[in-house]
Image (cartoon, grey):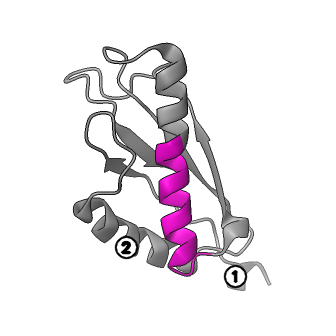
Amino acid sequence: ELAKRKTSVVSSTALFFNLNSARLLDRAKSAMQILAETIAAAPKDQVFTLVGHADDETGSPEYNQKLSEKRAKAVYDYLIENGVNKDQLTWKGVGSTENIFPVNGTNRVVVIK
């Protein structure tokens, strides 16, 4: 029945990193515990995308691409290790091509959508 069908869960989370680092910060791990619960409550066919970013003012485009991929993969690995279904996750890095926080230029982040 339509009334019993689960609808997609809307969630957007930003997990920040230190400069030139893909190491997960403790505060990011706390946010990921909540995110893991959100994903667990979502329909099993819903896929969440982890998008890694890097600052455009530091590092070459090639370096930033690799760093953004490492950041997204670190979040992916952590979530999988903590019981999230890998079929509900996908990840990618976009380097410094998308400035999502233009006010302060701090693009050291993975955004989950």
Q: Is residue 57 left or right of residue 40?
A: left
Residue found 50% across the figure and 19% down from its top: 97
Q: Which residue is labeled 2 in the image? A: 34
Report the span colored magenta.
70-84
Q: In this rendering, does residue 95 appear at all?
A: no
Q: Which residue is labeled 1 in the image? A: 3
Please tell me whether mark 2 or mark 1 is closer to you in this view.
2
* Position of residue 107 measured from the top left corner of the image (x, y, whole percent): 33, 30
Seen in the picture, residue 51 relative to 107 is either above or below; the reply is below
Describe the element under mark 2 as helix, strand or loop. Answer: helix
CA–CA distance in space, label 2 to label 1: 26 Å
- What amino acid is at disc 1? Ala
Describe the element under mark 1 as helix, strand or loop. Answer: helix
Magenta stretch contains residue 79 = yes
Q: Residues within 10 Å of mark 2 (few under 14, many from 20)?
A: few
Q: Main secondary structure of the magenta part?
A: helix
Residue found 54% across the figure and 19% down from its top: 62
Q: Is residue 5 left or right of residue 53?
A: right
* Position of residue 40 measured from the top left corner of the image (x, y, whole percent): 56, 79
Whichever of labels 2 and 1 marks the residue nearer the N terminus, that label is 1
Q: Quadrant of residue 48?
A: bottom right
Seen in the picture, residue 92 relative to 82 is either above or below; the reply is above
* Position of residue 33 measured from the top left corner of the image (x, y, whole percent): 38, 74
* Position of residue 16 measured from the top left corner of the image (x, y, whole percent): 30, 46
- What amino acid is at disc 2? Ile
